[in-house]
Image (cartoon, rainbow, N blue to C red):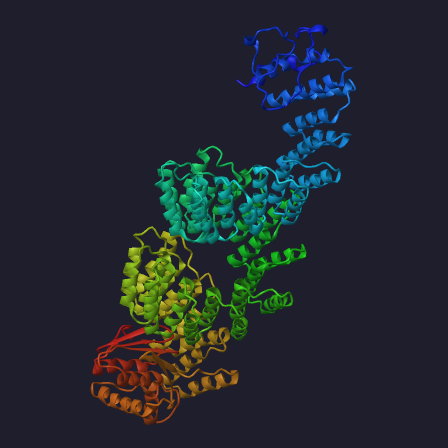
């Protein structure tokens, strides 16, 4: 039981004197006022000097008895003796402080005031120290301001009070007032002032105070020197710290640790390591704090293997073992440098070794779960916090949990956790606001922002950036820009993050005008086109269709890191300039900038669109060499690459090798089968997907239904269309309706197709009428083709493909006048047909052929090969399909026209330029015509070559006279 609990309540009331024995005046003794901590015993109050030593008690017991007899003592004070009064009152206040008897101290001060005893400097300091001890700041300050005499002890008490309360500005102000009054500070005052400067990171004042201290000849004791050293370190003045450190005669492990930690925290970890070695050479053995500083330094620098090595070395020592700080440094370092999975593994091992985590540990672990979107793991850690006393109520943990639930799309849980945080700080509000922004909750964010302001929390740049970035990433760039404007109206200047996010919002909304205005603001304010702003400008101009301006920004940048290179490569790739993107990649490597995962994911789709198989294979090798195959994004891009380059079996092998497939992996592989006409393979793969824990989405069914359509799997298509709603509660979107219309129309079920269109909950779009028109070409239905084309001419008035298809249908059935009218309509509307172009890659070089073009240097050999092929394939049954020539000319002219089609030229060039048996891979920008399709089947037979042709709709694999599409395209 505490001593104070044993004091009778009556002894705390100065008016209750009956229970306290009265002492005669002759028994009064003068009580020593010495406050020296070396005094271990004093005479008992009111005891006679002749009493034996065995009746004397310790000072604590004396103080206890003094408090019990306070009332009697005060009644017996000789008020005519100022020294006795001051010393007696001072001793009472001393023991009130020691035993925590605040109420008695208040009553004694009141009696002191009533009796009119003047507070001298000595007694005033004791009363002031009493109020300071209990944190009664108002009473202390009123007393201090009224004191006629203020000595160094008075100033020490009041300065210590404000410093202990964390009011460091007032601590410094009082110090200056003390100096102005001519009171010389001592070794108790200076450490408090240096601590205030340290906490405020006020290097200017800290240097002034230090220079003043030296000017008065006060060097201080080791404790003062340590406080100065700590101030220099925390204010980033490592040169001053180093000089003071070298001047110190005695350097214990604490001082060495301060220097090591100081260098590490100020970013000079190499010097920290040197200091660590010097420490050992000086014969000072590192302690747990030393090792933790080195481990944390390695972790902050991203040198995680070195951090683990130090950790293991520390583990092998006999004197101490890794503590919670050591483990937390490893966990935080891995989480901050993108190794969240490893951070969780370290945390598990920490628990196995029965080291109790603290709030910093838990915050880092929750952040790791956030990075990996591990909702269940995060919930388990939350449960652990609830069971562990003190963790769930910690504001640091609470903020991390709010951020975790918000980013894991459980905003309602995040809000509940936010409401449970008793002492919210600015980080709490910022986390919740960012969570609402990421979830797209505009009204909730505005209400919470207003509530935040009403509670006198002032939004800072992080608040606004969270709102701008969150809504922009959610796809609501307009709301993001609204918060950007609101931020500017508050007078807060946008930083790199604000500007980058605003530019991203302009990109998502295709707001080129505003994007240019922000670019102008950047230029006028001399804001450096750093990584964030430069890459955001490139992306903004690219997404707004101004690739020329994006390239202009890129050319202006003197410093180009991997982020900048990735931006321009991605911009070119997304705008169809795949060759330019590949050339930029080569320049990037020549500039000694190492491609990363983002680079790979940007360039592989460009290779896929170009069918640049060789370049894609080289990039694949780079991925393996550099260990970039740990990311699903890369695996999925490789599946897409090989699928689009015609190597569907290779794509499947990569799919099968994936350690962990996400839904994108399954969708990409199903789409690959669909493009190649392998409908049943797509169906079988979907059945495997149904046996996993993954849930198919709209993209899955779009790919699956498209595969069924290209393979003529009508029954399967109907089945999976209905399955969307019945088994997965997915309402079919317009894309799935378009796929089913295409499926029915391709199968010739035109009446069923039209009925289905009428019953759709959507207005038919260009994709649906395009499917009808394409099917009319297959089944030669000019009447329905006219109906479909009439809608398409309104929906896509500049799409030449629709006009060409209708004209082709007319010419096939011999309606030459109608075909001519279509061509006239094209001229009237200014619609131009892009020339047919085909590409083939031979010996790492891409060769292009345009219909009727004779510019290729090997054109004579190519033409001769075409004529030779025509002769060979006619012998085995090929008949030119002249109906695909739209002009009403003689049959000979039509046949000659067909010979000049770009895909035939590319095939002929491939045959004369590659070894026998080598597969040919052709890309065409338009739909392959019926005659070329027929001819290529025969060519594959007479040349014994596999010919893989990719047109603008799908792949065709020609092998031994048969096409994978089954003539159903």
796 shown above or below 455: below
> Which residue is pictured at 31% across the width and 54% down the height?
690
Asked if residue 566 can be seen in this view, the reply is yes
Q: Report how many numbered discs are placed on residues in the image.
A: 0
> Which residue is pictured at 44% across the width and 80% down the height?
803
Asked if residue 764 can be seen in this view, the reply is no
167 shown above or below 800: above
941 shown above or below 753: below
In percent of width and height, residue 509 lies at 55, 64
State which quarter of the image contains the C terminus.
Answer: bottom left
Left or right: 710 with respect to 46? left
Left or right: 360 with respect to 945? right
In percent of width and height, residue 761 lies at 46, 61
197 shown above or below 776: above
Q: Quadrant of residue 136?
A: top right
In percent of width and height, residue 281 lies at 43, 46
In percent of width and height, residue 663 lies at 36, 57
Foreground: 912 or 782?
912
Foreground: 956 or 455?
455
> Which residue is pictured at 77% across the width and 23% down the height?
118
């Amino acid at each position: 039981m505490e001593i104070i609990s044993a004091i009778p309540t009556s002894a705390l009331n100065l008016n209750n004197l009956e229970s306290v024995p009265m002492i005669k005046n002759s028994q009064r003794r003068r009580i020593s006022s010495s406050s020296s901590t070396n005094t271990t015993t004093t005479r008992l109050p009111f005891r006679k000097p002749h009493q034996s030593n065995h009746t004397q008690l310790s000072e604590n017991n004396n103080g206890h008895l003094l408090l019990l007899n306070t009332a009697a003592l005060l009644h017996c004070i000789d008020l005519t003796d100022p020294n006795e009064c001051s010393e007696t009152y001072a001793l009472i206040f001393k023991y009130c402080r020691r035993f925590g008897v605040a109420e008695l101290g208040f009553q004694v001060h009141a009696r002191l005031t009533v009796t009119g005893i003047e507070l001298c400097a000595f007694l005033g300091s004791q009363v002031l120290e009493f109020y300071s001890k209990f944190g009664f700041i108002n009473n202390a300050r009123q007393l201090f301001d009224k004191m006629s005499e203020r000595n160094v002890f008075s100033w020490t008490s009041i300065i210590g009070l404000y410093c202990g309360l964390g009011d460091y500005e007032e601590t410094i102000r009082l110090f200056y007032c003390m100096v102005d009054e001519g009171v010389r500070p001592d070794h108790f005052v200076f450490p408090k002032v240096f601590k205030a400067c340290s906490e405020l990171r006020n290097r200017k004042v800290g240097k002034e105070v230090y220079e003043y201290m030296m000017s008065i000849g006060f060097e201080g004791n080791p404790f003062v020197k340590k406080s100065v050293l700590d101030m220099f370190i925390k204010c980033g003045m490592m040169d001053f710290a180093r000089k003071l450190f070298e001047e110190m005669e005695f350097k214990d492990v604490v001082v060495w640790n301060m220097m090591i930690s100081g260098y590490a925290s100020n970013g000079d970890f190499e010097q920290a390591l040197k200091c660590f070695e010097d420490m050992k050479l000086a014969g000072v053995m590192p302690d747990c704090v030393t090792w933790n500083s080195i481990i944390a330094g390695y972790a902050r620098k991203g040198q995680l293997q070195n951090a683990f090595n130090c950790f293991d070395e520390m583990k092998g020592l006999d004197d101490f073992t890794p503590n919670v700080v050591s483990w937390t440094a490893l966990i935080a370092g891995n989480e901050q440098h993108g190794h969240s999975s490893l951070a969780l593994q370290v945390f598990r091992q920490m628990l196995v070794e029965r080291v109790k985590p603290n709030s910093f540990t838990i915050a880092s672990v929750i952040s790791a779960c956030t990075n990996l979107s591990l909702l269940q793991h995060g919930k388990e850690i939350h449960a652990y916090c609830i069971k562990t006393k003190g963790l769930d109520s910690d504001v640091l943990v609470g903020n991390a949990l709010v951020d975790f639930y918000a980013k894991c799309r459980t905003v309602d849980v995040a809000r509940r956790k936010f409401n449970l945080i008793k002492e919210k700080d600015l980080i709490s509000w910022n986390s919740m606001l960012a969570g609402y922004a990421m979830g797209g909750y505009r009204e909730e964010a505005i209400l919470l922002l207003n509530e935040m302001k009403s509670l006198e929390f002032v939004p800072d740049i992080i608040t606004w950036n969270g709102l701008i970035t969150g809504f922009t990433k959610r796809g609501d760039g307009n709301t993001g820009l609204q918060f950007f404007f609101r931020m500017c109206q508050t007078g807060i200047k946008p930083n790199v993050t604000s500007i980058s996010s605003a530019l991203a919002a302009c990109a998502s909304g295709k707001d080129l005008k505003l994007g240019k205005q922000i670019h102008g603001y950047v230029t006028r304010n001399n804001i450096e086109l750093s990584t964030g702003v430069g890459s955001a400008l490139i992306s903004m101009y690219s997404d707004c269709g101004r690739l020329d301006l994006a390239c202009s920004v890129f050319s202006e940048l003197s410093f180009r890191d991997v982020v900048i290179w990735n931006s321009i490569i991605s911009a070119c790739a997304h705008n169809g300039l795949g060759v330019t993107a590949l050339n930029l990649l080569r320049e990037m490597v020549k500039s000694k900038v190492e491609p990363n995962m983002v680079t790979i994911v940007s360039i592989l789709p460009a290779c896929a669109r170009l069918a640049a198989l060789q370049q894609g294979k080289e990039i694949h090798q780079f991925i393996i060499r550099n260990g970039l195959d740990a990311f699903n994004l890369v695996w999925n891009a490789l599946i897409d690459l090989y699928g689009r380059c015609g190597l569907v079996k290779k794509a499947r092998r990569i799919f099968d090798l994936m350690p962990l497939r996400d839904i994108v992996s399954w969708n990409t592989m199903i789409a690959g089968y669909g493009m190649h006409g392998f409908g049943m393979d797509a169906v079988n793969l979907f059945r495997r997907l149904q046996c996993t824990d993954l849930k198919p989405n709209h993209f899955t069914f779009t790919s699956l239904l498209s595969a069924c359509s290209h393979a003529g799997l009508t029954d399967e298509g109907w089945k999976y269309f209905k399955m969307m709603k019945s088994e997965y509660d997915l309402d079919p979107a317009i894309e799935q309706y378009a796929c089913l219309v295409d499926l029915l129309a391709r199968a010739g079920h035109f009446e069923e197709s039209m009925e289905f269109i009428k019953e759709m909950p959507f207005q038919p779009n260009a994709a649906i009428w395009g499917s009808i028109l394409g099917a009319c070409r297959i089944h030669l239905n000019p009447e329905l083709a006219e109906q479909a084309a009439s809608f398409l001419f309104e929906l896509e008035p500049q799409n030449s493909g629709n006009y060409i298809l209708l004209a082709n249908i007319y010419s096939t059935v011999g309606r030459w006048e109608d075909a001519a009218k279509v061509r006239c309509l094209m001229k009237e509307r200014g619609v131009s047909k892009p020339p047919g172009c085909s590409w083939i890659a031979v010996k790492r070089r891409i060769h292009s052929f345009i219909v009727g073009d004779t510019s290729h240097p090997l054109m004579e050999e190519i033409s001769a090969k075409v004529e030779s092929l025509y002769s060979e394939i006619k012998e085995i049954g090929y008949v030119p399909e002249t109906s695909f020539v739209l002009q009403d000319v003689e049959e000979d002219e039509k046949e000659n026209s067909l010979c000049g089609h770009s895909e035939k030229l590319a095939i002929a060039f491939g045959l004369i330029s590659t070894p026998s048996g080598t597969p040919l891979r052709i890309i065409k920008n338009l739909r392959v015509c019926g005659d070329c399709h027929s001819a290529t089947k025969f060519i594959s037979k007479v040349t014994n070559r596999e010919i893989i042709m990719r047109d603008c709709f799908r792949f065709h694999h020609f092998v031994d006279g048969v096409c994978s599409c089954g003539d159903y395209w």
